[in-house]
Image (tube, rainbow, N blue to C red):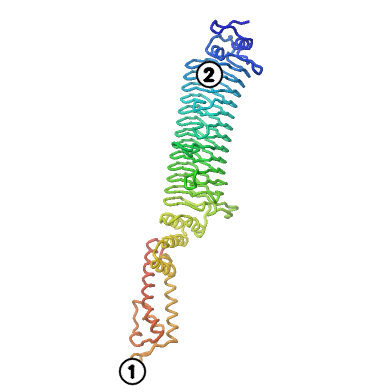
Amino acid sequence: MTDGPDWLGTLTDAEERLWVAFGHGRQVEYWYGEEVRAELVAALALGAVAGTPGRIAGVRIRGARVVGELDLRHGTIDVPLTMLNCTFTDSVRLEESITKSIDLTGSHLTRLSATGAQIRGSFKLNRVEITDGGEDAALLELLTVETDLRCTRLRCSGRITLINTRVGSALVLNAAELRYPGDVAINLGGMTVGSSLYFSNATVEGHLRMPGLSVGGLLTLTGCTLSHPPTDGHFAHQSITGDSITTGGDALFDELTAAGQIDLTGAKFGGRLSFKGAALTAPVPEWAALVANAVTVARGLYIGDGFRADGIVRLTGIQIGGHLDLFGMAPDSGRLQLYYAKAATVRDGRTKHGRYVSGGVESWPRDVALDGFTYEAFDPYLDAGERVKLLRRQPGYTAQPYEFMAAYYRALGHEEAARQILIEKERVRHQGFHRLSRLGSVISSTALGYGYLPRRAAIIALAVQGAASLFYGYEVPTAIHPGDHVTFYPVLYAADLFIPIVHFGQTDAFQSHGFAAFVAFLLPYLGWALGLAIVAGASRTLSKGAGGIV
């Protein structure tokens, strides 16, 4: 039997096998229930046995029951630690240690603490289960991992803390199950990940907190399910807090399901930001399900393909360098707020062989807020009638969405479409007028298209002149001075009455009676009204650069 240091006492058979194998770096296989003391593992890791020349020494075990607290705090460990499918009866402590790669794949832990540790290699927690719970279940803040931190299928009952941790390459949390209902389940605040963060198909019961997270490449939470958010405190009803996140590549939240608010305020994404097929829920429909205020997205925001939000989607001040892609958004989603947002292109439809086939206004939720929203183009291009349907989904009246959309059509050379948009603007604006003013609004709309269709007033004026001429051809007025022998001309008589600045002398020589006199009384007022409408409308048209009445 091999003797260890006196302070370790007599080694058991299971421990002796590890002691002998250590210098050669051989893996020791244990049957279920075989035990080794944690202090023996620590002694080997910290250099109690010299390595065999020509071999890579290391602690490599599988299936052991490690009894006691594995305390490696402040130690310098020059050998890899590989402890697969092991059961640890107490905490694993690595605070402020300096180690080579650590692999705990498949093991069962009570608690894990590695605050301030430096791992010169990879740290593998694949299929690890941490069960002791509480806010100190896995304390990994200020940890430095030079390559990958891999936690595929990690299961943790309690909080995982990775505040200000640095990972040189990838952080992998795919298919993880993290449960700390009603509290912060995982905290990635201020963390730096050199390449990519994979967090797909995970289950999080509690709050995912990651303000200030920096990812050099891809961030993906595709297929995640987030439930049981906090119900009180600073993070009440929030599933994700991600303000000021920065990524060098895409951020994918596709097919994600969240029972609380997602807040990405002030984030910067170097690629796409995608929520395709995601289902987001606000605690109250009047609250926001997604907040992306003052966000910068380099290559497009995708909130279509089945995306649905039970609550407001608040995109105030977002800057989108590519598509704002809405095609296929669920029509019963909550209000889409685009106050002072900016997008290069708004994509809300589909084309096939160059022809529009579906989408348009149906890709937008029934309630939109577009005040201050600017864009360079719609994809696909649709006529003004379709875009008017979108503008009608706004609550109340704001001028900017109409003016900007009209300018968009005018820039494309579609002046008629621009006028149609502006007429709709006036129609909505006039809905708030008092009853008497609304009467004038109806007349203005009918006669002039609120000043944007002066030719309509000109056509009405010609029609009135023609009708008056025919009328007075049958209802011939009587001569005031029969002896003057003045010839009566119905057209000139009607023009004398109807056209304000024309005088042919017919009304000086002839006078109507009865109903004809009543018509003669109305025609001058109608002439002045239409004349002023034509002049005002023509002036507005010219000032808008339309090139004249026609």
Name the front one of labels 2 and 1.
Answer: 2
Residue 264, can we see it?
yes
The residue identified by callout 1 is 483
Q: Earlier in the sequence, mark 2 or mark 1?
A: 2
Q: Is residue 128 left or right of residue 434?
A: right
Residue 170, can we see it?
no
| SS at circle 2 | loop
Looking at this view, is 88 or 521 the one in front? Answer: 88
Rendered-image quadrant of the N terminus: top right
Q: Residue furthest front?
A: 232
| SS at circle 1 | helix
At which x and y percent is residue 386?
52, 58
Dot 1 alpha-carbon crowd within 10 angstroms: few under 14, some 14 to 19, many 20 or more: few
Residue at the spot 59% in from the left edge and 9% down from the top edge = 52
At which x and y percent is residue 9?
57, 7
Looking at this view, is 211 or 418 the one in front? Answer: 211
Q: Which disc number belongs to residue 375?
A: none
Looking at this view, is 6 or 350 the one in front? Answer: 6
Say what amino acid the circle numbered 1 marks. Gly
The residue identified by callout 2 is 100
Alpha-carbon distance for marks 2 and 1? Answer: 126 Å
Say what amino acid the circle numbered 2 marks. Lys
